[in-house]
Image (spheres, rainbow, N blue to C red):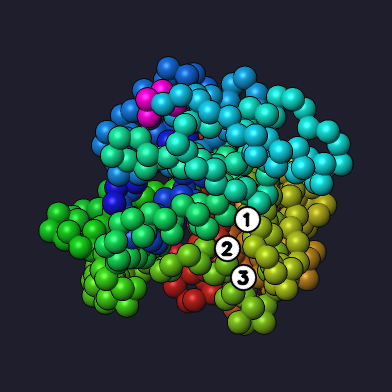
Amino acid sequence: MRVEVLAVGTELLLGQIVNGNAAAIGQRLAGAGLDHFHQVVVGDNLGRIKAALQQAVARSDAVIVTGGLGPTQDDLTREALCAAAGVEMAYSEEMATHLRDLWARRRGREMPASNLRQAEHPEGAVFLPNARGTAPGLRLRAGEAWVFALPGVPQEMLPMLEEQVIPFLVAEAGEGGVLLSRLIRCWGESESGIAERLGDLYESSANPTVAFLASAGEIKVRLTARAATVEAAAALLDPMEAEVRRRLGHWVFAVGQETIEQIVLRLCRERGWHLGTAESATGGMVAERLTSVPGSSEVFLGGVVAYSPALKAALLGVPPALITEQGIVSEAVALAMAEGGAACLGADVVVAVTGSAGPDPGGAPVGTMVVAVRTPEGAWARTVHMPPDRERARTLTSTAALQAVRRCLVGEEW
């Protein structure tokens, strides 16, 4: 069963909304063992939506369309479905009554007449109930393919996908089986370097497959296996994972969904240590990543953002003479920030960041960043060289800072 995803909405093309639906649908399809080869995004234009649908139904067994089911003039999915399937538009008085009742019960007022567009549907289509919104979904046959139209709002789309679309497709496929993926998370080596070490596995292994993904300084190696059961797929993944871990050694820091933020917090919790941050160039990004984890308050005490030299001295106790002698972007200043942060916050572990993120050099070449970590067992600092791009340098340095804490806590050199 080959399933394609078509997202409708000009706002997706303009980057005004991130297409998180695509990732969510992809995960559910993989978990159900359904092949997923294409994802397409198209704007709110009837001709282009129709063309994209026609191409999708010609090469896939099923197409999941998200968006374009609202009541406004630019919601064109219903019309495009009619054109792609070669049928006329029909109108359901039963659905119109349901929509009026829904507005009266949920919103306590009369429904605008424009919402009656949601009672229109391609002839022969089946309405899919939407328990969390007003826009019903649709299921119809177009040529040899099943087409499902779902609302674009994730809170409405996802339950409909899980409860009404995936079970239908699994039953239609009649193949059974699952796709199981495993992420091996690496840091400290480039994507190309990782790929070189695993090149023969990528070329020779069809099941499991091997793929690479770089994001925010982390390299993910994704292993994916197909088998009749989860247990059988896991049995295929286990030896491949072991071989990948053997080849990559200390660059592997996790397997699965546990993030570097979660790992750092867990390691501190296991030691009974509290954590803090003292940041300059990253402007609080490290603290933000840590506090994005639910329950982080058990471990994370707080952070100090001391951007100016005066605040580094006043809040973190960095000697002005040290800043004058060594410069803001120096390991000596980063270490002093970490020690000062420990005193200021009452933290056992503090990670400090200073640097030159650009575009102006700021006392060091752009991209020169310094990370220091202070624990009850000692303090360490290291200068790292990031791309001369402000946001990339800050993002990559926040990852490096968290990785530095992890390595210190597990006793690895960094």
Residue furthest toward the front?
93
Q: Which mark is residue 261?
A: 2
**Is 226 situated left or right of 21 in this image?**
left
Question: In the rendered structure, which amino acid carries the disc numbered 2?
Answer: Glu
Residue underneath mark 3:
265
Can see residue 384? no
The percent coordinates of residue 130 (x first, y second) are 62, 48
Can see residue 275? yes
Q: Residue at x 60, y 48 (%)?
A: 129
Secondary element at tag 2 = helix
Q: Which mark is residue 358?
A: none
Front-most of residues 388 and 163: 163
Please report the bounds of the magenta region as a residue range: 82-86
Residue underneath mark 1:
289
Quick one: label 3, few (<14), some, or many (20+) residues within 10 Å? many
The reply to whether the magenta stretch includes residue 38 is no
Q: Residue at x 33, y 28 (%)?
A: 54
Q: Residue at x 75, y 55 (%)?
A: 304
* Marks 1 and 2, how far apart at CA: 7 Å
Residue 151 placement: quadrant: top right
* Marks 3 and 1, how far apart at CA: 11 Å
Question: In the rendered structure, which amino acid carries the disc numbered 1?
Answer: Arg
Contact between labelled residues 1 and 3, with CB atoms less than 8 Å apart: no
Does 139 sit above or below residue 378? above
The reply to whether the magenta stretch includes residue 83 is yes
Secondary element at tag 3 = helix
